[in-house]
Image (cartoon, rainbow, N blue to C red):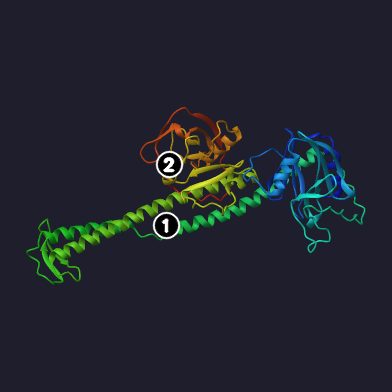
Amino acid sequence: MRFSYLKQIASYMERFTHITAAYRFDDTGIRLIFDKENSWNFDMSRGNSAISITDVSNRGKMYQAPFDVLLAKRFNRSNIVSVTLYNNDKVIRITVTQSGSYKSETTILQLEFTGKHTNAIILDKDEIVLEALRHIDEDVSSRSVRVGQKLDPLPTPPYTPQEYPIDDVRAFLIQESSRRSFERLERLKHEKKALMAKKLQTLKKHMEGLEDESALINEAENAQHAGHLLLANLGVIKPYERFAELNDFDGKPLRLELPAGCTTPSRCAEAYFKRSKKAKQKALGLYRERNNLIDKIRHIELFIQTLSEAKTPEEIALLFPPKSSASKFKKSDSIAEFWIEGVKVSLGKSEKGNIELLKNAKARDIWMHLKDRPSAHVVISTDKQQLPQRLLETAAKLCVDFSVFEKGRYLVDYTPRREVKMQEGANVLYTNYKTLSIEKTGVDDGFSTRGDSKAP
């Protein structure tokens, strides 16, 4: 950011007296909430840093690195002592205090908007580094940033910056938020939809290459018929013959080829029955594989539409939770997992996934489903009696987005899992439920790949 902008922004920030909450909202973004009307984002991306004012949104990922733990500990519910532009450079210092049971601690959050060395550093009152967004060693830069060491000041800029007056700082930052959010949203949409379209193409190509199970069923029926015909003519067929001249059950003459290696008519019949069973099993396997692919294709088509309808980068980030290698258990291919404010929300991609969710959910987990129509099942993993309304609405929107293509207003019922009784398959009966009304807005951006598969 321009030095002139930072100077005016720092001056504007002097009006704030408290920080309600402080946390990372993405890998390089820090959010400071001063009050209900002021949620400020400090994007500390190298070479593309910025400050903006935005609405508070759900956090898909909860950061728990030492920097994040200390940021929350020292700045949540803190009193602002001063906001200054440090060293006449692109550095904003926010000094706060927290009154504990025994003593009051002074902490400094130093936000450095210095190009490739952009950083966020937490200091104590003696300017000792407590934590930093980026730790910098001496072999990387002449100014190291290491925990426990005193932070050296940045060299004084060798130039006189130009002035770029801002008429309304707040309006400028809100506009900056809209501009950056739109640019990031469009970039993410393009990247993620291209990724999902590639997966969709692979699945469709796989399904097109499947063998036709109707031919296998016909083969199974013919083999079974031949087996029964041989058993009905055991006294007529001679051993070791390659063909048998028989009359079919309707009296028509039939020349039947006998399986190779059969020494007796009964073994020939057994070989036909085995051939029939094998063809039936293969047909059944193809039927199940085809249905599985149809479910996966439908899920990805809904996924692409949901991406198209996303209004913020945070909505897209919610759809792509970070992969974790720490879990000892293999994730089900039939269940999609999302994280909202650190709470796991699971969604069935198919009937199989819905059944898995119902069987594995705990009694106090929250279950969701569209009212009076087929839909994906959603389970919020929680032991809390009360959940934030925003979390419930976000989970309900996932239920709608991954169940229907058509825009409109939909009702979503939710209740603890213990109130849900499984019937046949994924059909259920439930009681003591509440209902949310969710609006689905359709977007036609020319990227739709929707097929004609049915809802789960």
Please say whether residue 372 is visible from this viewpoint.
yes
Image location of residue 360, percent across then percent down: 45, 42
Looking at this view, name the residue that lies furthest to the top: 432
**Vertical order, 171 against 283 (above or below):** above
**Vertical order, 194 against 393 (above or below):** below
Looking at the rendered structure, which numbered label has been put on residue 359? Answer: 2
Image location of residue 227, percent across then percent down: 17, 60
Please say whether residue 444 is visible from this viewpoint.
no
Q: Regarding mark 1 in the picture, which secondary structure is present there?
A: helix
Q: Could you say which quadrant of the image residue 97 lies in? A: top right
Please state which amino acid type lies under the numbered disc 2: Lys
Which one is earlier in the sequence, the residue at label 1 or at label 2?
1
Alpha carbon distance from label 1 to label 2: 29 Å
Which residue does the image show at 20% across and 58% down from the upper left? 224
The answer to whether 170 appears left or right of 415 in the picture is right
Which dot, 1 or 2, sits closer to the camera?
2
Q: Nearer the viewer, residue 101 or 16?
A: 101
Q: Residues within 10 Å of mark 2 (few under 14, many from 20)?
A: few
**Vertical order, 234 against 379 (above or below):** below
Looking at this view, name the residue that lies furthest to the front: 102
- What residue sits right under mark 1 in the picture? 207
Please state which amino acid type lies under the numbered disc 1: Met
Image location of residue 422, percent across then percent down: 39, 36
Q: Could you say which quadrant of the image residue 173 lies in? A: top right
Q: Nearer the viewer, residue 358 or 370?
A: 358
CB of mark 1 within 8 Å of CB of mark 2?
A: no
Looking at this view, name the residue that lies furthest to the left: 235
The answer to whether 42 appears left or right of 444 in the picture is right
**Vertical order, 21 against 335 (above or below):** above
Which residue does the image show at 21% across and 60% down from the upper left? 273
